[in-house]
Structure formats: structure tokens, C-alpha cells
Amino acid sequence: MARSEARLLVPALMFIALVVAAVASLGTPLITSVATSFHVSLGSAQWTLTVALLSGAVATPVLGRLGAGPHRRAAILATLAVVVAGSALTVLPLPFAWLLAGRAAQGVGLGLTALMMGVARDHLPEERSAAVIALISVVSIIGAGVGYPLAALLAELGGVRAAYGLGLVVTAAALLTAWRSVPEAPEGRSAHVDVAGAVVLAAALLLVLFLAGERNLWSRHLAVAAGLAVVAVVLLCVWAVIELRSTTPLVDVRAVRHPAVAGANLAMFVGGIGMYLLLTLITRYAQTPPGAGYGFGLTTFVAGLVLIPFSVLGFVAGKLTPRVRMRIPDPLLLAGSAVVVGGGFALFAAARSDPAELFAAMGVLGFGVGGFSAAMPGVILAVTPKSETSSAMSFNYVVRSVGYSLGSAIGGLILAAGTGPGHLFPDDSAYTTAALAGIGAMAITTLTSLALARRRSSETNPYVRSTHPHTGGSMPKGYWVSVYRTISDPEKLAAYNVLAAAAVKAGGGRTFARGGRVVAHDAGIAERTVLVEFDSFEQAVAVRESAAYQEALAVLSDGVERDFRIVEGID
């Protein structure tokens, strides 16, 4: 892209990611107001948040697959149109069922975050795209911190409809921004949606989020809850089988099984539980009236202001992370960020007698979450082809959504267990127990991230043998094998060689043959042959998709006709 177009694209991607995250989070501060305005129970009003998370979790992998194909721009515009229509339903004076339908349509927008990352990786220089992808990941988190206080203020001033009106205005602006700024996907791609996989995944996630939200079910009907949990696990297993057998899977489960990707998703799942647990603990504690023996009795709007340090320091961490990751590997950044979040839990557990201490704990949480979110894409995309960016990151966001939902549910269960008979509010010690549980979750996240860092170190150190994740033997290497049929433009080939050599070297490749003597036998033809070795097949694929090598291919253009293959070696 031209430099001026790139400058316009970056803020557009940020704005769209921020809007869809903020709009999806609108349900959080408005649950009580919705229950009062529509004369429904708090449990029913809670579904204004749950249904958005559910539709987002289902839409994310579907949109991720569409984002890998040629119609990505159309998918983005159509999705934003659905979000705008849903926002209109939340504003119009319609019954509660229509509000839920509108919130479900708004939640679909959560699937756009991974597509924004795919656009950045395709249309920005490699060094620039990494920083932009990290910030997109961060703003998708801190969007809740932006939307919460604004929605709470509008609800106090003009009621629920006015708060949801904010969503309508900003989503319309996001649609216009996307129409003017988002380019078409590169040519030569195709993508098909696995409908059967999407249906089974939707059913499984519906059960998971239902069980996460219905806390009373676990306390009053444990056998039913456990049975539904088993059904959810079975459905997820069935979904995995469908994806493995499908020629056009919704999510490439084989790629997800790569140790780096699987480890990153595990860290995201457990870390998401801890991060959202602390977020809900602090906001609930701030709104508890002092008559309970603790708390500050803050209004919804003032309590929402506690999220400002979370958003500000989260954005600061997101801006700093791309610079730090030049010196520190992404897995170590994940581990360090998890330790910071654990520090936020420790601060909340030890000191919460003053509102300033809550602000401090929320700031520490924001800085840790910002760093964690900014480093996460680097771990996954390091072993992911460029064309699969949206699909790979979409699965990570599904994992994150489920982790957040479970974090909220676990916090609610711990506080409910700490509420004595006849008491409206839990004991203060219940918050300490929940904080200790969060510290445990972040400890697991830290250990998982350190294991990822150790594995990456062994892969990049030529003196340490890598091992196959399944057999325990040496990791199969990857090879580029190029056979040149004809060379019509030697100058283009010479220019390509310079750029390609730099791209291969930067990607860890080793060139073993380049145009040397060839002795052909059987049906072979003595033609110019190039052989390049990489430490793994995934690395060979990723370097082929890298921006640096794509630049070399653009220079080569039609200067040669060749047979280019990426081959996996034996163990």
C-alpha cells in the first residue's frame, strides 16, 4: 500500500476493533437498569451480556475462515451492517426479546478483531504490521474500559435506550470507516465455511456459556449442571473430529495442535479466567455499600471510572510491547505480563481499604493485560502462514471469550459461597479467597508461558535438538525445493535473489544448493535447482508467507517459470 493509505488504514483498524469491543461490553453496566426498565429478573437481564458473548464466540471462527478468503472486505462490511442493525434494535421501543436479538447481533462484531489483524498483516510492512496487530489485540481488551463508564453515565442521564444509542452512533461510524478504508484481500485465496462444524460449535459454546452464567444451577442442581458439562465436552470432541475430517475446516485443528499454538491458547484460556476474575471483583467491591462492612457504595458511573487506569495503562503496555519484544521473546513477555496480573491480585488481596488502592490494582491489571494481549499474537503468528492469520487468531479469541466467561462465573461462585444465610453481600474474606484463586490461575499461566519460552529457545539454538511433540524424536525439518523450468528475465532473477536471500536468512533458513551442477536420471531434467532447509515445516511455510519474501516474489514477477514446493522432512 502507499504510505498515505497505510497511515489511514492503521487508525481505521484500531477504531473498528475498539468499537466492536466497547459495544459488546455495553451489557455489563446496564444489567440492573435493563431488569428495572423491562421488568425482568436480574438473571434474564444477565443474558444481554451472555448472548453477545455467545454470538461473538460462534461468529469469530466463521468470520476468521471468511477472512482467509477473497471476500474479506465484503465480510467485514456485512458484519458491521449486522452490528448496526442490532444496535438499532436496542434503541427502538421494542419488547425485551428484541433487545436480546439486538445484543446478539452486536456480539457478532467481536469476530472482526481477528479480521483486522489479517488486514494489517496483508497490507502493512512486516515490522509495522507486528506492532499494529499487537495494538489491535490490546484495544479489543480495553474497549470494555472505554464503553463501561460512558454507558453508565448515559444510563443515569437518559436511561437504557440512551446508553444503547451510543452503540448505534459508534457502530455506524465504524461501518463508514470500514467502507472507506479497508482494502480488498490479496488475490489467489479461497475459503469455505464448514457449516456442520459451526452448528456443533455453537451448541457446545451455548452450553459452556449457559453453565458459566447460571451460577444457581451449580449450587442447587449440581447433577444437572455436571450432566450438561459432560454434554458440552462431548460436543466439543465431536466438533474436533468434524474439523479433522473436513477438507475445509472452520478451524485448522492440526495447526492448533502445534505446541506453540496449543500452549498459547492454554495460556490465554487460564489467563483469561484470572484477568476477568479480577476485573469483576474490583468493580463489584467498589459498588458494595459500606454498610456491608467494606466497600464504597459507588454508583455505576463512578465505579466505571475505576476502569480508566485499566484502559490507559493497558494501552501504554500495548505501545511498549512491540519495542520490548525486539529484545525479549514473546513467550517471556507473556510470562512477565502474567506475573504483573498476579501482582494486581496480590495488591487487591492485601490492600483495598481505600478507593485509591482499587485504582492502583486496576492500573496494575491493565498494564499486565495490555502486555499479555500485545505479546499473544506474536506467539501464534510466528508459526502461522499469512493467509491463515484471521483463522488462527479467531480460535484464540474463542478461547479467550470462554476463559472470560468462566472467570466471571468462578468469581460469582466464590462470592456466593462466602455469603452467609440471610445476608445480601458476601463476607470480605470471600474477596480474599477469590483473589488467591486468581493468583493460582496466573501462576499456571506463567508456567505455561515459560514452557513456551523454553521450547522456542531449544528450536532457535542450533546446539539443542528439538523433539517431536508426539513421538519424542527429532522434529521434522522443512525444505524449499525450487526447480527453474525457464528463465526469461535474468535481471529480475538477480534482484529476487538478493531479497530472497535476506528473507530466508531472517527466517532461519539455510541454503544448501543454488544453481549448482545437476545430474539428472530417469525422468529428471538437469535444470537450475535451489534447496533451502528450515528447522520445521511450519517455519518453512511461515517464511514463504512473510512480507519480506512476498516482496522478493513481487520483484521476480514473471521473470521465471519454476516448480516451487515446500516439503516436510522425516523425523
Image: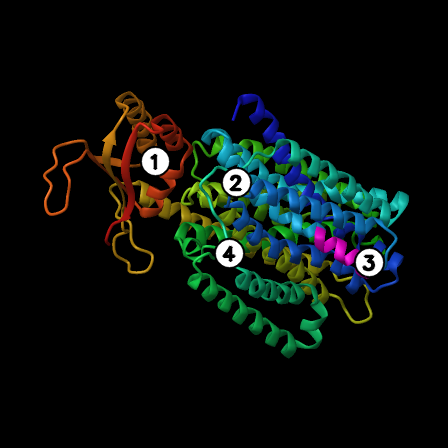
Q: Nearer the viewer, residue 472 or 444?
A: 472
Among numbered discs 4 and 3, the one appearing first in the sequence:
4
Among numbered discs 3 and 2, the one appearing first in the sequence:
2
Q: Nearer the viewer, residue 78 or 101?
A: 78
**Label 2 vs label 1: CA separation?**
20 Å
Q: Specify the quadrant that holds the C terminus.
A: bottom left
- Count neighbours of disc 3 (C-alpha within 10 A) and say few if under 14, some if 14 to 19, many if 20 or more: some
Secondary structure beneath dot 1 equals loop
**Label 4 vs label 1: CA separation?**
28 Å
Q: Which mark is residue 292?
A: 3
> Is residue 144 shown to the viewer in this render?
no
Secondary structure beneath dot 2 equals helix
Q: Residue 434, relative to residue 152: is it above or below?
A: below
Whether residues under marks 3 and 1 lie with C-beta atoms below 8 angstroms apart, the answer is no
Range shown magenta: 96-105
Q: Looking at the image, which residue is at 71% across and 62% down? A: 415
**Label 3 vs label 2: CA separation?**
49 Å
**Label 3 vs label 1: CA separation?**
59 Å
The furthest residue to the bottom: 223
> Is residue 3 shown to the viewer in this render?
yes
Q: Nearer the viewer, mark 3 or mark 2?
A: 2
- Count neighbours of disc 4 (C-alpha within 10 A) and say few if under 14, some if 14 to 19, many if 20 or more: many
Among numbered discs 2 and 4, the one appearing first in the sequence:
2
Disc 2 marks a residue whose amino acid type is: Gly
Image spot of residue 370 (x, y percent)? 59, 40
Among numbered discs 3 and 1, the one appearing first in the sequence:
3
Q: Main secondary structure of the magenta part?
A: helix
Whether residues under marks 4 and 3 lie with C-beta atoms below 8 angstroms apart, the answer is no
Residue matched to label 4? 250
Asked which quadrant contains residue 115, the reply is top right
